[in-house]
Image (spheres, rainbow, N blue to C red):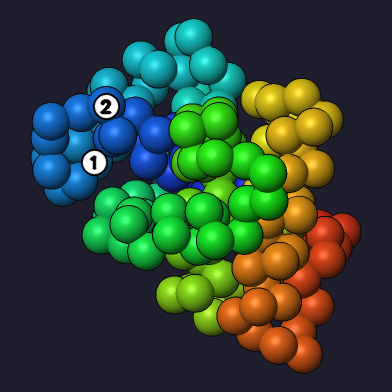
Amino acid sequence: MTRSTAREIAIHCSYSLGFSHQSPDEFLEERLDREIFLRWGEENELYREYPNEKQLQYIQELVRGVAVHGPELDQYIGQHSKNWTFERIPRTAAAIMRVAMYEILYMPAIPKAAAINEAVEITKKYEDEKVVSFVNGILGAFVRAEFPGETGAKAEAAPEEA
């Protein structure tokens, strides 16, 4: 499993957790149960390969981190959204941006440009081009504002291994 796949699974989990009454730990324990996970794989190719220990840790860190820092991440999204109210942003796009922003802010080993690129590529799978451009613009503006002097543009990156 690539890091890109693990990231997309973390986005799915972060999205779904928003509709759950479970704590992040309860949710992850259930969702990442090997049997349940592989059952998801019968319907979604993304879940066909169970993550290794490093990938599980990565997914768990992202989901827990996004849950803990959700209000902060949403504030950044709202702050950089031009002509879009938060309610207008598709929930999938919001989940994608939260994960990318968490990586950018709290996972310094992941290059900022790679986090943005991955977010944009994942958004292309779920949303139309207007939303893809919006996500790219928000994440770029976020990096430029929070990390002056560092690049915030979408960058082409090879798939990462987790």
Residue 87 lies, in percent from the top left, at 47, 33
Residues at badges 2 and 1 in contact (C-beta under 8 Å)?
A: no
For the point 82% across and 30% down, which residue is it? 129
Which quadrant holds residue 106? Answer: bottom left
Which is nearer the eye, 99 or 46? Answer: 99
Specify whether 26 is left or right of 63. Answer: left
Residue 126 versus residue 93 in the image, above or below: above
Identify whether 36 is placed above or below 5: above
- Which corner quadrant of the image does residue 104 belong to? bottom right
Is residue 61 in view? no
The residue shown at (71%, 88%) is 148
**Disc 2/disc 1 C-alpha distance (Å):** 14 Å
Give the label on residue 28, or none.
Answer: 1
Q: Could you tell me the amino acid type at mark 2?
A: Phe
Nearer to us in this view, 127 or 33: 127
**Residue that sits furthest to the front in the current view:** 83
Nearest to N terminus: mark 2 or mark 1: 2
The residue to which callout 2 is attached is: 19
> Quarter of the image containing the N terminus?
top right
Q: Is residue 126 visible?
A: yes
Q: Residue furthest top?
A: 43
Judge left or right: residue 104 versus residue 83. left
Estimate the x, y position of residue 38 in percent, counting from the top left.
38, 22
Give the secondary structure at mark 1.
Answer: helix
Residue 111 x/y as whole percent: 67, 74
Q: Secondary structure at mark 2?
A: loop
